[in-house]
Amino acid sequence: MEKDFSPGDLVAVGDVHGQINLLFKLLDLVRGTGVRLLFLGDLIDRAKRPEDDVAVLSLVHALSDSPGSEGLAEVDALRGNHEDMLLAAMSRTWEDLAQWSFNGGAVAVLDELEDHKEWLESLPLFKRVDKTVFVHAGLRPHVPLHQQTKNDMIWIREPFLRSDWLNIDGVELVVHGHTPNFDGDPVRFGQRLCLDTGAFDTGVLTAYNHNTGKTFQVGVTEGLLKPLSGKN
């Protein structure tokens, strides 16, 4: 695929879930372009091999510290529910370990993942760019942005997913992950764009260039460029 990026473009990336090979392919596309990468959360869990979760987390953390090493302007990540469950599991209580493990957490590599605790704790819940909000799960309709709760921003599905109009002042588009579409397509509905295409199951990782309004994918449909309309 011919690279369709300009320096400073903001590229949001859907849920990686430990798919290190897909992450490498994504980096191959954006390397040296000077774009800003923003991961929407759920970097970890559900990888086929526990060490892949460690590899993904280590790579994104390293890139956030030194984006220029790959010719990028900036690399940031948001906190998803899986990062939140991992942080809770670091307490080593049975309930927290069980919840994380049940949701795909790799307890065998918890010690290695814990090396990134301070960075994970620093991850923001959302990023606002003009009238677009980037967040892991979504926003609660009719609630001002400054009153949104952490629980909603990393866990919400309904009523966010079926709202034609969010009625949130100053917000025209919400770019999110969390709710996978196992058809492998990004979903555009109402005022939201979902980039979670179930990478751990479909082998498709989806990203969105906010500056051009195009989504692109690596994996089964590698290099495919699509308009913002996505799938209704």
Image (cartoon, rainbow, N blue to C red):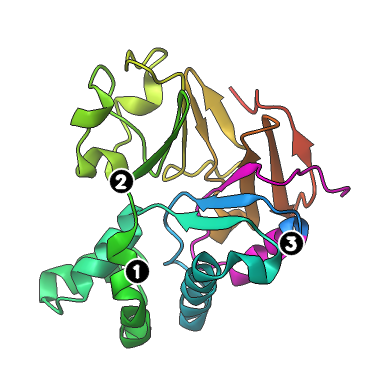
**Labels 2, 1: front one:** 1
Relative to 10, residue 148 above or below: above
**Left or right: where 67 falls relative to 194:** right
Quadrant of residue 126 within the rendered picture? top left
Which residue is labeled 1 in the image?
Answer: 119
Residue 30 in view here: yes
**Residue that carries the numbered disc 2 in the rendered image:** 154
Residue at left 46%, top 18%?
172
**Element assignment for label 2:** helix
- Residue name at image x 50 percent, y 65 percent: 64
Compared with 143, 112 (above or below) is below
Earlier residue among tags 3 and 1: 3
Which residue appears at 83% of the width and 48% of the height?
3
Stretch in magenta: 1-28
Q: How much space separates mark 2 and mark 1, taking CA atoms?
A: 17 Å
Q: Amino acid at mark 2?
A: Ile
SS for callout 1: helix
**Residue that numbered label 3 is attached to:** 31
Which badge, 2 or 3, comes first in the chain's sequence? 3
Pinpoint residue 160: horizontal percent, then vertical percent: 34, 26
What is the quadrant of residue 229 in the picture? top right
Please identify the quadrant where the C terminus is shown. top right
Query: Quadrant of residue 161 in the image?
Result: top left
- In three-dimensional space, the C-alpha distance between marks 3 and 1, rounded to whole angstroms, equals 23 Å
Kindly indicate whether the residue at mark 3 contacts the one at mark 2 (C-beta within 8 angstroms).
no
Percent position (x, y) of residue 22? 65, 63
Q: How many marks?
A: 3
Left or right, 130 with reference to 166: right
Q: Position of residue 106 (x, y in %)?
A: 37, 77
Q: Is residue 92 left or right of residue 82?
A: left
Q: Nearer the viewer, mark 2 or mark 3?
A: 3
